[in-house]
Amino acid sequence: MKLYEYEAKSILASFGVPMLRGRLAATPEEARNAAAELGSPVVIKAQVTVAGRGKAGGIRLAATPEEAYRVAANMLGGEVKGLKVAKVLVEEAAEVRREMYLSITNERASKSYIILASPIGGVDIEEIAREQPDKVLRTRVDPLAGLRDFQVRRVVRWLGFEGDRGRQVEAVLRGMYRAFLEYDADLVETNPLAELADGRIVPLDARMIIDDNALYRHPDLQKAYEEDPRDVTQFEAAAKKVGFSYVELDGDIGVIGNGAGLTMATMDLVYAYGGRPANFLDIGGGANREVVYEAVKLLLNNQRVKAIFINIFGGITRTDEVARGVEQALREVGRPKPIVVRLKGTNEEEGRRILAGLGIEMYDFAEDAAQRVVRLAGQ
Amino acid sequence: MKLYEYEAKSILASFGVPMLRGRLAATPEEARNAAAELGSPVVIKAQVTVAGRGKAGGIRLAATPEEAYRVAANMLGGEVKGLKVAKVLVEEAAEVRREMYLSITNERASKSYIILASPIGGVDIEEIAREQPDKVLRTRVDPLAGLRDFQVRRVVRWLGFEGDRGRQVEAVLRGMYRAFLEYDADLVETNPLAELADGRIVPLDARMIIDDNALYRHPDLQKAYEEDPRDVTQFEAAAKKVGFSYVELDGDIGVIGNGAGLTMATMDLVYAYGGRPANFLDIGGGANREVVYEAVKLLLNNQRVKAIFINIFGGITRTDEVARGVEQALREVGRPKPIVVRLKGTNEEEGRRILAGLGIEMYDFAEDAAQRVVRLAGQ
Amino acid sequence: MTVLVGGDTRAIVQGITGREGTFHTGRMLEYGTRIVAGVTPGRGGAEVHGIPVYDSVEEALSSHPDANASVVFVPARFAPDAVYEAVDAGIRLVVVITEHIPVHETIRFVRYARYRGATVIGPNCPGIIAPGPRVKLGIMPGHVYAPGPVGVVSRSGTLSYEIAYHMTSRGIGQSVVIGIGGDPVPGLDLLEAVELLEGDADTRAIVIIGEIGGDAEERVAAAIAEGRVKKPVVAYIAGRTAPPGKRMGHAGAIISMGTGDAASKVKAFERVGVPVASTPSEVVKLLEVVL
Amino acid sequence: MTVLVGGDTRAIVQGITGREGTFHTGRMLEYGTRIVAGVTPGRGGAEVHGIPVYDSVEEALSSHPDANASVVFVPARFAPDAVYEAVDAGIRLVVVITEHIPVHETIRFVRYARYRGATVIGPNCPGIIAPGPRVKLGIMPGHVYAPGPVGVVSRSGTLSYEIAYHMTSRGIGQSVVIGIGGDPVPGLDLLEAVELLEGDADTRAIVIIGEIGGDAEERVAAAIAEGRVKKPVVAYIAGRTAPPGKRMGHAGAIISMGTGDAASKVKAFERVGVPVASTPSEVVKLLEVVL
């Protein structure tokens, strides 16, 4: 789950990270009042969970409360990089002396937490890492020992601070680390982290991504996510509720597989034979007929999908359950478009028997099935 | 630092351990009011940091508020096992179905935390361990992994609970563990931990010992300790402030050493030659003349001490500093009793020169010095 | 012992009384796996497929001191605790089938296991199977495997079944197949698994089934470049058509922060001379060349 | 390498710019110890006795990659962090002189060090000295030691100086003397130290200097009974006249909960045939018998 800037900043502030003064506004009036309260000029920032807002017009300066009203009126209800803007963050405009980068994330290779720090900020860390790799400090935190003082000192020194400002950077890092742990974050990032002309150290922007598997431990966030799934489409959110993984793509061949790798391989096969997948739909391990039924129904009802390719290799998944789910969906929706199935694995004979009874085309090899579905979709 | 029962219970309660209702009372009137408020009968418990209060008359039942007044009046200002009673804890009298034992402490051998649990309680754990060793469960907690659910389940099962009462025991254990960690405890013990007739699981008694080296992290406790050093004598508390370890014994030969082992060995030597040490006084590693001066002065002024044996082997400690401290004390107090010195190690020549100047008896071997001081004390 | 498992493997099943635990215990036993005990707190004294169930791993081990591996089917909220319990009791190989465990939990219990000298496979994985000694610790369909000289390591479950099926159909058996799981941080990672196969006398060639997300494949390629892997390797990478920024089913299958796309992995392998199949079945053809 | 230290020992000193750190760095250098760097955060660039000072262990090691040991003089509140820093940087032997570290902190960093393959001596200890190669990592007075065949392990600092002094005076030198420290939970404990000496080719006999508190001596006696220690052992136990319930200077020197009195330790040793000296100087007489 990606958090909005204002959510991330509110969490970080609760862990002692100093912040610019700011107010959330959902209407132009609120934005004007916020600007008046904070004292102009202010910065108006569209709350969307996508990087690169600035270049896309999602961050604007407003010199007066009236200008804040106009800027907010312009942003609210509009889109930034394809995402609706429902709220803006109105913040005091600060004079920035220097921009830095600081983040904490999970590192796959070391199987630990890692702090990335750079005295260069305001651009993507990938860009910094690519162009000035020697400016990026990587500090691994042992997950059992936790963040230690010597590591904090190392980061503070790397960013070029000591004394009072060093202590401010320390507060930022410790607050970020606590938020990272207590919110089960995949990422906590302040970019840029700014040294202001008045000596304050504050994040100008903040991002947090929460581990979806840990959302149950954070009921407030879970609720916020259910009310507003952010950059996830309605279709994707609905699929998640039913219990399968679904990602929309821009082609016309519906793809259903069991297991992420097999489903991706199925997409890749469709593409290799000249077709364009309309989606990624993984019914997951051990799916029952209900999930399959919902999955097939989703694609049957999707107008953009011209043909469906179901590719199942049963391990946990019992292929007879899959066949029964297909049967149920077809009974309910009818068969508005061709379906091609390839079924292998647990209870294969029974599964094939059921599908044969429905008159569905079946193949032994995924390649043959893929070729066939591409041909069917092209007709 | 040993906590009083009421302090330990207050800390445990703050971590969610269920408790009997109780009130602290410093006067008989307060005890009467507490009994009236709690509803009679009540139990009146002398607050002293020593085990075995019950047998020594420190725990009494009172059937009415008036009886509570009389019992408290009797206890308050009196002594239990040699310790003054300044406060009593007035608690609801509960009907106990079963008494158990539960504690968390640091285990030297495994270098980890250890939970001791026994379905038998109300007597010393040493006694249980000696007489029914198969009734004592020892569960080691990895200090980096922390207390895990499976360990909690193991303890709950061992004590013979499941269901609702199991969850109560779980709350007790988790609260004790959190208190153990957050208060840097050497020991957190509930003994007996009782199952009441009404189904509640509550500690009847609770003990906590806080690591003296961690007291600085608990300013409230540090303050309470400074105001009331509990079972430490005034002499011992004064010595600690100056910076040396001091323990009163019942003999008449004052012993000063540097390093705990050497000081104990010095006591043992005195004893081996027929003398009786009056104290253990370790000036510690790297002691300066000021500390030595205070130490020598303490023994010079102690009427019970008939002769003093100073045994120094210098590592961190510089023997010339020791000699100067002795010199300063003698200059100030005079020499009301004989002093025998054995000096070895860092800056030995200078130290010996100073002491020789004072006319102090010096020996090369501790054995000789010990024999001599025993003889001097006997004269 | 081939790699991690062998004829002396004696397994316990944690969460044996749950639906998946019971079902797959049956399949593992059918395959030939020596399962000596099951564990479900509160269900001690029961039996599942004739296997005795205990309340704790400690009790299971006191009755079955030869147990040296565990398969975990415990639900996500309780699975981390099950791993600590197994490691604490001295189990040296813990296979975690459970999906949806928070990554922070995994990072911690994987570290703890490593510090205690135990290996975790998974979470969110199909497990490990050795067709020679007929040991299956996991949920893969046993009938698609056959004994042979090829070690397989896979980030994807079903895709590994698929490829093993193709191999077996063409007469190429497997020394061991390890499904390391689809989470971002697997206990045993791709490189560690490949290194085990490199050191295994029964393995002549290695199949790596990768997918988008992270840089595990690139790290294997780097190890090959350094000469740390000398056996022939064939690879397949799923997700060539996956868009960036989207989790493709597996928590770990996401192209993010500029890393993890399939093209980079294919290129990394090809650069060190590892042929990369463009379809699952092509893996077999490439294998026939190197064997 | 005798035990833990030897000719290839290259040490750093953490907290080198403090009073004790500076003083003892001088004494260690005089003795012959190869100290390659010092560390004090914020004092990087300074020099102490000609030794360069760095802001962090990491920086010290990047300039002195041969450093393999550390001596910690950092004040108690910061000493645990210094240990994590040393271990994290790859130092394999950390000698913690610092006193008054909370036991919980020690338990954690000692466990961390063990999991990372490092050994901690201390805290609250005099350190380790090997008179043969002239390596001293600690605060003991170097002039009382001489090379020889006897390994000494002590819970007490000054008492070990005293006994080494008696030994040297009578011509009995030491292979290595390890002061494990007076805290309740020492990094390297009495038994572990004895086992190291048992395995050391340069050590012919072992002196154990124990004291009241805990059951470390009893555990050594048990190991002797099991035949795990075969070399001749001579012991001394301080605190025969100590009362129960009182901490005798050392945090670990307390008879509590019915364990830790001197009589029990003396009895445990005598039961397994280890002679126990009744005075420090008698240790030498007993040694002369067994050597």
Image (spheres, coloured by chain):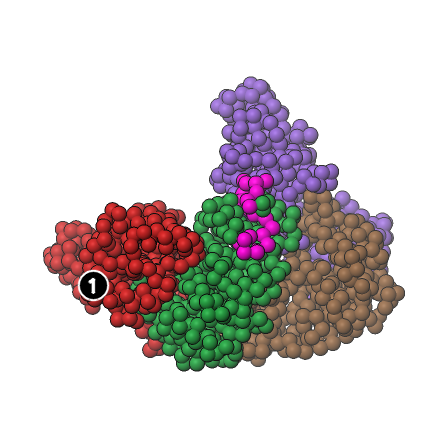
Chain colours: A purple, B red, C brown, D green
Instruction: Judge the density around disc 1: few (<14), some (14-19), many (≥20) Cα neighbours within 10 Å.
Output: some
Q: Could you tell me which residue is drawn at 37 percent across and 55 percent down?
A: B352
Residue nearer the viewer, D172 or D202: D172
Q: What stretch is highlighted in magenta?
A: D28-49
Residue C61 visible? The answer is: yes
The chain containing the residue under callout 1 comes to B
Tell me residue B337's x, y (percent).
Answer: 22, 57
Residue nearer the viewer, D3 or D281: D281
Residue found at the far right of this picture: C289
Is B378 situated left or right of A336 in this image? left
Is C130 situated left or right of A228 in this image? right
| Residue behind mark 1 | B81
Q: Quadrant of the rendered structure where residue A332 is?
A: bottom right
User: For the residue marked with disc 1, what is the amino acid?
Assistant: Lys
- Residue A234 among magenta residues: no
Image height of D208 relative to D17, above or below: below
Residue nearer the viewer, B158 or C119: C119
Q: Could you tell me which residue is drawn at 50 percent across and 77 percent down?
A: D291
- Residue D46 among magenta residues: yes
Tell me residue B250's x, y (percent).
Answer: 23, 64
Q: Which secondary structure, mark 1? A: loop
Image height of A192 relative to D176, above or below: above
Tell me residue B37's x, y (percent).
Answer: 19, 52
